[in-house]
Image (spheres, grey):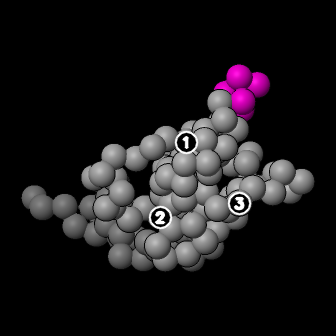
Amino acid sequence: MRPNKLTPGSNLLWESSRMMLPEHKQVLQRHQKELNQKSKPTLDEQQMDLLSQMISDAMEQNCIVKVHLFHLYQDKYMIGKIQKTAPERGEIQLSSKNNSKWIHFGDILDISFPSNEEMNIDHP
C-alpha cells in the first residue's frame, strides 16, 4: 500500500504548509556568515618594522606593490603605488589606475611586489 497524507506516522499532511519566515532566514544567513568569520592576526614588532621598511622602499623606488589587507570573511588584496603616508593618522595612500584609497596601517597583513600576471588581474 502506498503511503498517503492519512497514513499513521506520516508527516505528509503538513508537508505543503512548511515555510520559513524572512526573519528566520535572515538569522540563519547571519549565523552562517559568522561561522566563516576570521579573527585578525596580531603582527609582532619585527613584522611591523619589515612592513614599514617595505613601504618606505616602495615609495623611494616608486614601484607597484601588492597589499594584503585584513577582512573578516575573505582575503582582500590591492595593487598600486604608495603615494603618501600619514604617520599621525596611521595610514598610507595607495593609488591604482582607477582610484586612490587611504588604508589604515593596522589593516595591512603583508606587502609584496606582484608578478606581471598579478598586475594584470583586478582585485577587490
Q: Amino acid at mark 2?
A: Pro
Query: Disc 2 marks which residue?
Result: 124
What's the distance in space between the residues labelled 1 and 3, CA to CA? 15 Å
**Is residue 48 on the magenta stretch?**
yes
Marking on residue 84: 3
- Neighbor class of circle 1 (other Cα within 10 Å; few <14, some 14-19, many 20+) is many
Task: Look at label 1 and name its amino acid.
Answer: Ile
Viewer-side residue, 54 vs 24:
54
Which of these two is toward me, 54 or 39? 54
Mark 1 vs mark 2: which is more N-terminal?
1
* Magenta segment main secondary structure: helix
When asked about the image quadrant of residue 10, the answer is: bottom left
Alpha carbons under labels 1 and 2: distance apart = 16 Å
Mark 2 secondary-structure assignment:
loop
> Which residue sits furthest front?
60
Q: Residue 13 at x, y = what percent?
A: 35, 71
Q: Residue at x 40, y 47 (%)?
A: 114
